[in-house]
C-alpha cells in the first residue's frame, strides 16, 4: 500500500505501549494480593485511587525502559515496516520490558522481608552472597508460583503483541513522510520528557519515591503506588546523604546529647556477649507480649521466655533498619540505616567510635561470629572496619557436615562452636554473633522435623529451633568459668513473617526484643519505655564502666534519666519518629507527612488541625536527629576526636 503519513505505524506503536501499561497494572494488583496484610487497603475507592496515582510512576518507568523501542518505532529510518526490522523491534521491546517487569515479581516476595520496594540499595545483599546460584534455585522451589505467574504474563503479553501485526509499507512521498515523521517524533519526545518528569511544569522536579506518599491516606499505600522498576531507576547513583543546618545545635544537644558520658565505677570488667538473632521478631516471644492484649496470642520461644524472667527486658523495642547489615551498624556502632545501608555508603570506611573500639580500648578481646561463608551479607568487610580481633565464619568452623545446604552452619552446632572458642579466650572479652537458621526458606535439620510447633507461619518452627539452640548454648556456657561475670544481650536484626494484626501495622514492622541478662542477677525487670537498637551500645558502655565520653544518638537504658525515650525507624521513603506523646512522620526531604497518636502504629489516623507547640517540638527533634546523623556521617565525625 502507498501512503505518506505513518498512521498504521503510530497505531501499532501506541497499542504496544498500552500493553506495557496493562501489564504494569496487573503487576500492581498481584503485588497487592501477595502483600495485602501489610498494605492495609480496606476500601475499593482507595484501591482504585492507588492504581490511578500509580499511573504517573508507571509512565516514568515505562518510558525509561522503552526509550530505545520508542526511537526505533517512530524515528524515520525508511525501513521501519520491513519484517527484519520489526524482528529487531520485537526483541528490543521484550528483552528490555521483561527484565524490568520481572523486578515487580521479585517484590511480591521480597517486600515481606524489607517492607519497602526494591531499590539499588537493596541489591547490596545479593552482591555479598557467594552462593547466588544455590539461592536462586532455592527461591525457585519455594516461590515457584511467582515464577509461574511471570511466565504466564509473559506468554499472554507476547500473544497480545502479535495480534496486531504491522504489514510492510511503501511511501509515495518521502518528503512528506520524513517531515511529518520528524514533527511527530518531536511531539512524542516532548511527551516522553514530560512523562519521565511526572508533569510538564518547569518548576516541578522529576517525581521520586517520596512523591508516592502525596495522594494516599496511609503511608503504607505509597509502596503500592510505586512500581519496582521506578524504584530502582530513581535510586541509581543517588547520594542519599545530604548536609543541612536548619535545626539549632542546642535542640540536638538537648534532645539527644550525641556525646555521652556515664561515670559508673566497675571494678571487675564483665565479659559481653551480644546475640543478634536472625528474624527473631518481638511478635514470636511470649514474654514480650504480655501487655499487648492480642487475641489468641501464641509464642514460640519457651527458653527465651524463661530467661526473660531473670533479665532486664524492653517489650517496646524497635530495630533501626530493615536488614541484617543495618542491624550490625545500629547495634555495634550506634549508626542506624534508613533508606540505604550506612555500611554500603561512600562514608562507611571511616574511623568510627563503636562498641568494638571502646571495648578494645579497655583491653577486651573482641570477636565476631557468623556461620555463613566468610563475606556473606557484607559482615566480614564491616567487621574489619570496626576492628574486631577475630572473625569466625564457615571457613573457621571447617565442618561442612553441619552446612544447611544454603546459608551456612545450623545454629545449634555453631552456637556450641562459639561457646568452645570463647572458653579459650582470656577475659575480659566481647563477642557478637549473628545467627542464620531462622531464615527463608524456613527449614530445620531433618532430625528435628516435627519437633517444634508448626505455628501459623513457616518461620515459626525455625524460631523454635533457634530458641532451643540458645537454650543449649546457655546450658553449655553456664559450666564455664567466664559465665557468671558476663552480660548477655539478645535482640533481633529485623522482623520477618507476621501473623497477628498488631504486628502488621507499619511501625510494628520494626518491633524486636531487647533483653539484657546477667547470671549474677544485677539487671532484672521489665521496662515499658521506648527502646531501640542504637540504645544497646550506650547501655553496655554504662554497664561495663567506660568512663570516657563517646558518641551515641541512643541512651543508656539503665541509668539515663535526662534523655527522653524515643525510637527512629524508616521504610525507605519516610521517617517515623516515636516519642511518648506522638508519632511524627516526615519524608526523606524532611518535610512533614503528619502527626499520629503514640499508639497509632498503623499510621491510619493523621491528627488534624494546626500543630500544637508539643507537636512542633517533636518535629524539631526528629529533624534534628536526621540533620546530626547526616552531618556527622558526611563530615566523618563518627568519633569524639574533633569534639
Image (cartoon, rainbow, N blue to C red):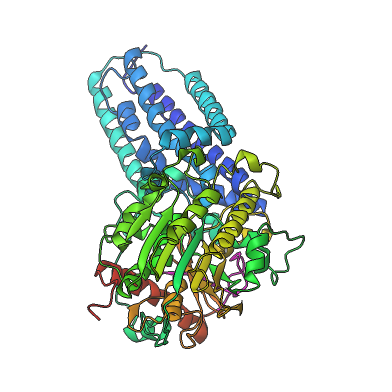
**Magenta stretch: dominant SS?**
loop
Which quarter of the rendered picture does the N terminus lie within?
top left
Looking at the image, which residue is at 34% across and 27% down? 73
Q: Is residue 627 visible in the rendered structure shown here? A: yes
Lateral position of residue 397 relative to residue 105, left or right: left
Q: Is residue 585 visible in the rendered structure shown here? A: no
Report the magenta residues as a range: 591-609
Looking at the image, which residue is at 31% across and 32% down? 68
Identify which residue, 587 or 52, lies in the foreground.
587
Looking at the image, which residue is at 66% across and 72% down? 309
Looking at the image, which residue is at 45% across and 45% down? 228
Residue 147 occupies which quadrant of the picture?
top right
Percent x, y for residue 65?
Answer: 37, 37
Q: How many labels does the image show?
A: 0
Is residue 319 placed above or below 410 in the rendered structure? Answer: below
Percent x, y for residue 438?
Answer: 56, 50
Is 94 inside the magenta-drawn segment? no
Is residue 369 placed above or below 551 in the rendered structure? Answer: above
Residue placed furthest toward the top = 1
Is 603 inside the magenta-drawn segment? yes
Which quarter of the rendered picture does the C terminus lie within?
bottom left
Percent x, y for residue 162?
Answer: 48, 19
Percent x, y for residue 4?
Answer: 31, 20
Lateral position of residue 406 relative to residue 142, left or right: left
Residue 334 occupies which quadrant of the picture?
bottom left
Is residue 415 placed above or below 524 in the rendered structure? Answer: above
Amino acid at each position: 500500500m502507498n501512503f505518506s503519513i505513518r498512521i498504521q505505524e503510530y497505531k501499532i506503536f501506541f497499542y504496544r505501549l498500552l500493553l506495557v501499561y496493562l501489564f504494569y497494572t496487573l503487576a500492581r494488583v498481584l503485588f497487592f494480593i501477595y502483600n495485602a496484610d501489610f498494605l492495609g487497603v480496606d476500601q475499593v475507592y482507595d484501591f482504585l485511587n492507588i492504581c490511578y496515582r500509580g499511573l504517573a510512576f508507571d509512565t516514568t518507568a515505562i518510558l525509561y525502559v522503552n526509550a530505545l523501542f520508542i526511537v526505533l518505532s517512530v524515528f524515520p529510518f525508511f525501513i521501519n515496516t520491513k519484517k527484519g526490522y520489526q524482528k529487531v523491534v520485537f526483541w528490543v521491546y521484550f528483552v528490555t520490558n521483561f527484565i524490568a517487569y520481572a523486578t515487580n515479581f521479585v517484590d511480591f516476595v521480597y517486600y515481606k522481608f524489607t517492607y519497602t520496594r526494591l531499590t539499588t540499595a537493596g541489591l547490596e545483599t545479593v552482591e555479598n552472597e557467594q552462593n547466588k546460584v544455590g539461592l536462586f534455585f532455592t527461591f525457585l522451589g519455594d516461590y515457584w508460583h511467582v515464577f509461574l505467574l511471570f511466565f504466564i504474563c509473559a506468554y499472554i503479553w507476547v500473544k497480545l503483541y502479535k495480534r496486531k501485526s504491522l504489514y510492510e509499507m511503501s511511501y509515495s512521498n518521502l518528503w512528506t513522510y520524513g517531515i511529518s515523521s520528524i514533527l511527530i517524533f518531536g511531539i512524542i519526545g516532548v511527551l516522553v520528557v514530560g512523562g519521565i518528569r511526572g508533569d510538564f511544569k518547569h518548576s516541578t522536579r522529576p517525581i521520586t519515591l517520596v512523591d508516592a506518599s502525596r495522594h494516599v491516606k496511609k503511608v503504607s499505600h505509597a509502596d503500592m503506588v510505586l512500581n519496582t522498576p521506578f524504584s530502582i531507576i530513581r535510586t541509581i547513583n543517588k547520594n542519599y546523604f545530604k548536609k543541612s543546618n536548619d535545626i539549632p545545635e542546642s535542640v540536638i544537644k538537648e534532645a539527644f546529647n550525641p556525646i555521652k558520658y556515664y561515670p559508673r565505677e566497675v571494678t571487675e570488667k564483665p565479659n559481653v556477649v551480644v546475640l543478634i538473632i536472625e528474624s527473631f521478631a518481638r511478635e514470636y516471644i511470649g514474654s514480650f507480649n504480655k501487655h499487648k492484649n492480642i487475641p489468641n496470642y501464641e509464642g514460640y520461644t519457651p527458653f527465651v521466655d524463661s530467661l526473660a524472667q531473670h533479665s532486664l527486658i524492653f517489650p517496646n523495642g524497635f530495630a533501626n533498619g530493615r536488614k541484617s547489615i543495618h542491624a550490625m551498624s545500629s547495634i555495634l556502632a550506634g549508626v542506624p540505616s534508613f533508606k540505604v545501608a550506612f555500611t554500603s555508603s561512600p562514608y562507611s570506611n571511616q574511623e568510627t567510635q563503636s562498641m568494638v573500639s571502646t571495648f578494645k580500648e579497655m583491653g577486651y578481646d573482641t570477636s565476631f561470629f557468623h556461620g555463613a561463608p566468610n563475606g556473606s551479607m557484607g559482615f566480614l568487610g564491616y567487621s574489619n572496619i570496626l576492628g574486631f580481633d577475630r572473625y569466625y565464619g564457615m571457613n573457621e568452623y571447617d565442618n561442612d557436615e553441619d552446612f544447611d545446604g544454603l546459608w551456612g552452619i545450623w545454629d545449634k552446632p555453631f552456637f556450641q562452636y562459639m561457646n568452645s572458642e570463647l572458653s579459650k579466650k582470656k577475659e575480659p572479652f566481647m563477642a557478637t554473633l549473628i545467627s542464620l537458621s531462622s531464615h527463608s526458606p524456613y527449614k530445620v535439620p531433618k532430625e528435628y522435623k516435627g519437633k517444634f510447633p508448626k505455628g501459623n507461619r513457616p518461620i515459626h518452627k525455625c524460631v523454635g529451633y533457634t530458641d532451643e539452640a540458645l537454650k543449649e548454648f546457655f546450658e553449655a556456657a553456664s559450666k564455664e568459668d567466664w559465665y557468671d561475670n558476663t552480660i548477655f544481650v539478645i535482640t533481633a536484626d529485623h522482623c520477618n513473617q507476621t501473623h497477628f494484626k498488631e504486628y502488621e501495622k507499619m511501625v510494628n514492622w520494626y518491633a524486636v526484643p531487647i533483653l539484657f541478662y546477667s547470671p549474677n542477677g544485677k539487671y532484672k525487670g521489665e521496662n515499658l519505655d521506648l527502646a531501640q537498637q542504637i540504645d544497646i551500645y550506650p547501655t553496655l558502655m554504662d554497664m561495663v564502666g567506660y568512663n570516657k565520653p563517646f558518641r551515641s544518638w541512643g541512651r543508656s537504658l539503665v541509668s539515663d534519666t535526662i534523655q527522653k525515650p524515643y525510637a527512629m525507624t524508616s521504610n525507605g521513603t519516610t521517617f517515623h519518629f516515636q516519642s511518648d506523646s506522638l508519632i511524627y512522620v516526615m519524608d526523606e526531604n524532611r518535610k512533614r507527612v503528619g502527626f499520629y497518636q503514640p499508639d497509632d502504629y498503623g499510621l491510619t489516623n493523621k491528627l488534624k488541625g494546626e500543630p500544637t507547640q508539643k507537636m512542633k517540638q517533636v518535629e524539631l527533634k526528629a529533624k534534628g536527629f536526621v540533620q546530626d546523623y547526616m552531618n556527622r556521617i558526611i563530615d566523618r565525625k563518627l568519633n569524639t576526636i574533633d569534639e
